[in-house]
Amino acid sequence: MAAELHVELVAADRSVWSGEATLVVARTTSGDIGVMPGHQPLLGVLESGPVTIRTTDGGTVVAAVHGGFISFADNKLSLLAEIAELSDEIDVQRAERAFERAKSEADASAERRADVRLRAVAAR
Amino acid sequence: MGAQLRVYKRRIKSVTATKKITKAMEMIAASRVVKAQRKVAASTPYATELTRAVTAVGTGSNTQHPLTTEAESATRAAVLLLTSDRGLAGAFNSNAIKAAEQLTARLVAEGKEVDTYIVGRRGVAHYNFRERKIAEQWSGFTDQPEYADAKAVAGPLIEAIEKDTAEGGVDELHIVYTEFVSMMTQTAVDGRLLPLSLEEVAAEESAKKDEILPLYDFEPSAEDVLDALLPRYVESRIYNAMLQSAASKHAATRRAMKSATDNAGDLINALTRSANAARQAEITQEISEIVGGASALADATAGSDK
């Protein structure tokens, strides 16, 4: 069996996804980081952005994460985010509408949030 | 129907209506407690992971941070009091307010000024009525708090603690909320949120599970991680307190409404008995009137016969 790591993706008010994975790619403040099984213990600050999780059965889970932390130790990876959504949960039309609205209102943070959602869907 | 009996009947009807209402409120509260408890449980993974991360930074580096360093002589403290928007919950709000007042008195005795921050209309009304100063207040979400609400509450508090005391900032942050122990027991508790002692958190964490934390690699640096981590930690603690407070409030409402329903039942029983007695008295009176009338009539006829 290939090496695997246990992933917990938790938002502030719920546990979003958990399972076994072979690779997790996330964006920290100093750039994208890929974590594979056996990585050295890590604690980092996440940027808003899509997180890609390659599961052991070959599938891919993409989630939009808005700020938070990544921590890895003992082959257990936790992604903590105030808000996290799986790409399947994202309503594309709503995100697009929000994106347009944020653009016209010049609301930078709302625009970024909507953008992250859309990118997460595109990466699916 | 006699006047007395009519009064009893009317009261029975009104108490029955009240009983129906309190019963409904009891059931609503009971279902909300379960929901609130589920929310507490759902927020636990985030809180545990966050605590782990804070512990990791606390043990893995010697970073100093304004949120973890204790002022040499604290002169001002903020007290965050969590109450509910609505009453009908027994002593729930008064217990929380009492706990806050005790804490305030203790802090004042230690020579600190106290700024009070209040969540929930009940606490705000209590302070306004006594014309006490409230630094900031929030209401409207105490029944079902969201994480965004906790963030809104935590924001000004973190700002206040980061500010210099001379410019109106505070040195300490205390929180008073009602801990949900069980369906039957909820206790108002107070605790110091900030400055956070990393050692304490670490000791608490390692006491729970006997494990040695690995040496972490910090990305981008331990200071930055701590910078980002501590406000989140405070938010998550406030969120947890809000959820517990909401669950406690619903449990207290359920209990208060249950005893109100029981009392209404007792009252209906007593009133029914009184109504029965009144009715019986009325009948007895009528019979004696009839008998009296008949015998008077009989006496009269007997007299005329002579």
Image: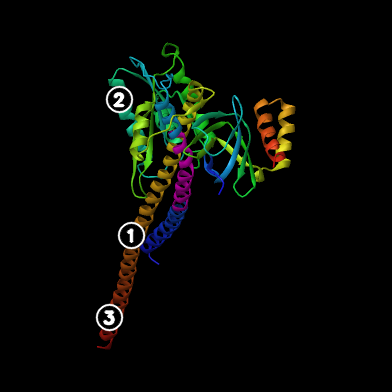
Q: Secondary structure at mark 3?
A: helix
Mark 2 → mark 1, Cα distance in angstroms: 42 Å
Left or right position of B45 against B175: right
Dots 3, 2 in contact, CB < 8 A = no
- The answer to whether marks 1 and 3 sit on the same chain is yes
Q: Chain of mark 1?
A: B
Instruction: Give the residue number, with chain letter if any, for mark 2.
Output: B105
N-term mark: 2 or 1: 2
Q: Amino acid at mark 1?
A: Asp
Where residue A33 appears, as percent x and y from the top left, is 60, 31
Where residue B260 appears, as percent x and y from the top left, is 37, 53
- The answer to whether marks 2 and 1 sit on the same chain is yes
Dots 1, 3 in contact, CB < 8 A = no
Mark 3 → mark 2, Cα distance in angstroms: 80 Å
Residue B295: mark in rendering: 3
- The answer to whether marks 3 and 2 sit on the same chain is yes
